[in-house]
């Protein structure tokens, strides 16, 4: 969930920062240009005030002679260009220069400079030239009219280089980008803390649910952190787990009590059947059938009592040599295998694991017994112990008929038996008892097909000591 939630939060925060950053970057560029434009307007206004009083007079030979004011204007324009590197000129309406610097500066027939000149001819100064961006190499043009007696007699034009302005704009953008990056890092850190704070209770609830689903019914959630809704959910979950545990405890107690209470009457009934059989002819089929059903009922009651005890008793975990224990159980069943004509093969190297030796022995007995029941004469039952990363496994494979795919999903259910094997002795509780015994110690049991035919049962126990999972906390951090 965090992998889906965190990118969404990051994208949203990046969108907000970009939405704020772009207008700010445009504002910085506009402010830098406006500052330059204001300076150029002041400069052109000063030149226009000088140009207002420039006049010419005719000499005796008919050639115009420039007065001292025009010479002063020319000197100011030249000094301005030399100091600031800005082209500046004052041009009459017919584009003839009143003064200019450098000497080749002129107003072309078209382009931005001509547009600014034409606009100033209508007494409108070009106070809002097009924006120059840092990646553009354009020049900034500002024009102001020279007004004399209410008429525009000339236009002051400046053409400024934009390198310095673009550099300042770029520096401003870099500062904005650095601020955005820092804000993004802070936002990512906040998102990590936020998602961790929100999702930590969910992970704890998920882990506790898994513990309860695998048989560790004492697991609970300590609702001490996270959003209020998740804390309420944790408390409700604990209440539900308490109720489920109470119901299951009542069920186990009922099964155990019923099994225990029924054993004495059943033992008395079987005893009376034995006494009654002495009064009837030897080999009476009805008596034999009743005796067989009574013994079967006694086995069912014993298995029910074992199952109730397996689900109720806490595991006594200890570091165990799984290979040695499995080899011991194989030897215990070898006589039974020989009587059936089944080869019982063991490959049990010394491998350790954390398990309850008594519970694991009982589970292996049930698995091996089941394999011997369904393996025909001349076939093989193999018990293999191996280490698999963080677990130790005991594989029991047989050469029996095996199970169909839909039957594999039901194997281990209480009282379930395949419809093809109803004639084989058993109560249908042996593998359920094995699962309960293994789950209590953090182990597991799995079933699969064994090629070319038969069933493969894999019993796994952890190789490291399981951590206590009775209460998992949602503490604030």
Image (cartoon, rainbow, N blue to C red):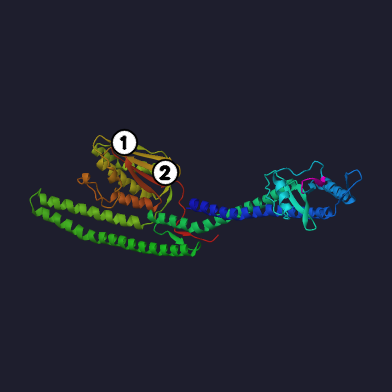
Task: Name the residue rendered at 77%, 43% in the picture.
Answer: 106
Q: Looking at the image, do the residues carrying marks 1 and 2 touch, with CB atoms under 8 Å apart?
A: no
Residue 103 at x, y = what percent?
Answer: 82, 42
User: Is residue 68 inside the magenta stretch?
Assistant: no
**Front in this rendered view, residue 219 or 48:** 48
Residue 67 at x, y = what percent?
Answer: 89, 49
Q: Which residue is mark 1?
A: 451
**Front in this rendered view, residue 204 or 148:** 148
Q: Which residue is mark 2?
A: 392
Mark earlier in primary sequence (1, 2): 2
User: Is residue 94 inside the magenta stretch?
Assistant: yes
- Tell me the CA gap for discs 1 and 2: 22 Å
Which residue is situated farthest in the right direction here? 60
- Region in magenta: 93-100
Rendered image quadrant of residue 306: bottom left
Indicate whether 395 appears above or below 118: above
Residue 294 in the figure: left or right of residue 242:
left
| SS state under label 2 | strand
């Amino acid at each position: 969930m965090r992998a889906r939630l965190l990118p969404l939060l990051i994208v949203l925060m990046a969108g907000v920062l970009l939405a704020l950053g772009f207008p700010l970057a445009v504002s910085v560029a506009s402010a830098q240009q406006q500052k330059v434009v204001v300076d150029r307007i002041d400069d052109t206004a000063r030149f226009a005030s000088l140009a207002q009083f420039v006049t010419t007079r005719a000499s005796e030979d008919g050639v115009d002679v420039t007065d001292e004011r025009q010479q002063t204007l020319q000197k100011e324009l030249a000094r301005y260009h030399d100091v600031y590197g800005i082209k500046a000129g004052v041009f009459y309406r017919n584009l003839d220069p009143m003064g200019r610097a450098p000497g080749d500066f002129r107003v072309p027939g078209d382009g931005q400079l001509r547009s600014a000149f034409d606009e100033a001819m209508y007494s409108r100064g070009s106070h809002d030239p097009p924006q120059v961006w840092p990646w553009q190499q354009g020049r900034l043009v500002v024009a102001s009219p020279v007004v004399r007696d209410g008429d525009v007699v000339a236009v002051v034009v400046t053409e400024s280089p934009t390198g310095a302005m673009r550099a300042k704009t770029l520096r401003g953008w870099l500062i904005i980008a650095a601020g955005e990056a820092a804000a993004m890092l802070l936002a990512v850190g906040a998102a990590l803390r936020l998602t961790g704070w929100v999702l930590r209770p969910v992970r704890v609830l998920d882990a506790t649910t898994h513990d309860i689903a695998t048989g560790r019914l004492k697991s609970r959630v300590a609702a001490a952190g996270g959003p209020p809704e998740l804390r309420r959910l944790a408390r409700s979950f604990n209440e539900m787990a308490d109720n489920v545990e109470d119901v299951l405890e009542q069920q186990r107690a009922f099964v155990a009590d019923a099994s225990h209470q029924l054993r004495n009457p059943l033992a008395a009934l079987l005893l009376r059947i034995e006494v009654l059989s002495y009064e009837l002819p030897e080999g009476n089929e009805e008596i034999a059938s009743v005796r067989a059903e009574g013994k079967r009922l006694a086995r069912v009651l014993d298995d029910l009592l074992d199952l109730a005890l397996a689900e109720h008793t806490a595991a006594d975990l200890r570091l165990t040599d799984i290979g040695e224990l499995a080899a011991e159980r194989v030897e215990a069943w070898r006589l039974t295998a020989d009587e059936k004509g089944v080869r019982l093969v063991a490959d049990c190297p010394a491998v350790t694991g954390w398990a309850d030796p008594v519970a694991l022995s009982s589970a292996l007995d049930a698995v091996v017994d089941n394999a011997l029941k369904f393996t025909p004469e001349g076939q093989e039952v193999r018990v293999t112990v191996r280490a698999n990363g963080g677990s130790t496994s005991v594989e029991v494979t047989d050469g029996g008929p095996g199970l169909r795919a839909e039957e594999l999903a039901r194997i281990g259910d209480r009282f379930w038996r395949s419809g093809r094997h109803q004639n084989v002795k058993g109560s249908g509780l042996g593998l359920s008892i094995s699962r309960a015994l293994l789950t209590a110690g953090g182990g597991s049991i799995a079933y699969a097909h064994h090629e070319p035919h038969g069933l493969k049962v894999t019993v796994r126990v952890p190789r490291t000591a399981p951590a206590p999972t009775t209460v998992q906390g949602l503490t604030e951090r």
